[in-house]
Amino acid sequence: MPRSNARAPALRRLRKKAERLAYRVAWFGVRWQWRIFQPVTLGVRILLVRDGEVLLVRHTYRSGWFLPGGGLKRRERLADAARREAREEAGATIGALTFVGLYASFHGKSDHVALFAATDFEVTGEHDEEIAQVDWFPIEALPADVAPGTRARIREYQSQSGPFTDDW
């Protein structure tokens, strides 16, 4: 009996690595499925800003920091999707939303992203398993590995001259 207890932490670490590998494989598989069967997609991202800081997420299946967000579900409104993704990926319950812009990305598929911002929200810290880390960063001192599109959207938001329509 004590022998199996000693192995428990190692087994948990191994299970966690296997889960991350499974998410990574699924992510690449879904990307190829999209390229073949859904050449046009629509998603949302959300800027959660408070006291000069922005909330960013790190996924288990890809490197870098991103704004919380994801694809729309069938019969879902853009604002509802932004609220759902903020809740799932960052544990945030959103009050008022502001539309920032609509963007396009044509890297293998036609991907369109609606960007929203919120300053009225509560964060519980609970998030889906696909998120490895949630953290706050000063808008003026973003981490070096923030995704280029995320960095550009934050800078545009700061300029307050939107709404924007551009490439992600």
Image (cartoon, rainbow, N blue to C red):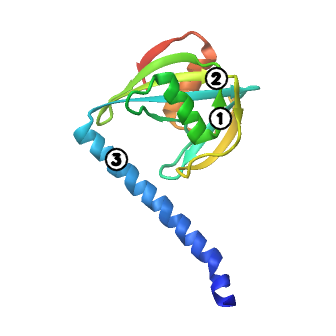
How far apart in space, not on screen, are marks 3 and 1 (Cα)? 26 Å
Q: For the residue labelled by badge 3, is the local secondary structure a helix, a strand or a loop?
A: helix
Q: For the residue labelled by badge 2, is the local secondary structure a helix, a strand or a loop?
A: strand
Residue nearer the viewer, 36 or 80: 80
Task: Report the residue at 69% width, 22% height from top.
Answer: 119
- Label tally: 3
How far apart in space, not on screen, are marks 3 and 2 (Cα)? 29 Å
Q: Which residue is mark 1?
A: 92
Instruction: Give coordinates of residue 158: x percent, y percent.
Output: 63, 18
**Does the CB distance between marks 1 and 2 fall below 8 Å?**
yes
Tag 2 or tag 3, which sits nearer the N-term? 3
Tag 2 or tag 1, which sits nearer the N-term? 1
Q: Dot 3: few (<14), some (14–19), or many (≥20) neighbours within 10 Å?
A: few
Instruction: Give coordinates of residue 67: x percent, y percent.
Output: 56, 34
**Which is closer to the viewer, label 1 or label 2?**
1
- Say which amino acid is labelled 1: Ala
- Say which amino acid is labelled 3: Val
Q: Which image quarter holds the N terminus?
A: bottom right
**Does the CB distance between marks 3 and 2 fall below 8 Å?**
no
In which image quadrant can residue 22 be found?
bottom left
Task: Report the residue at 50% width, 59% height from top.
Answer: 20
Image position of 103 with respect to 145: above or below: above
In this picture, residue 58 sits left or right of residue 62: right
Residue nearer the viewer, 5 or 31: 5
**Which is closer to the viewer, label 3 or label 1?**
1
Q: Which residue is mark 3?
A: 30
Q: Dot 1: few (<14), some (14–19), or many (≥20) neighbours within 10 Å?
A: many
- Say which amino acid is labelled 2: Ala
Q: Which residue is mark 2?
A: 118
Tag 1 or tag 3, which sits nearer the N-term? 3
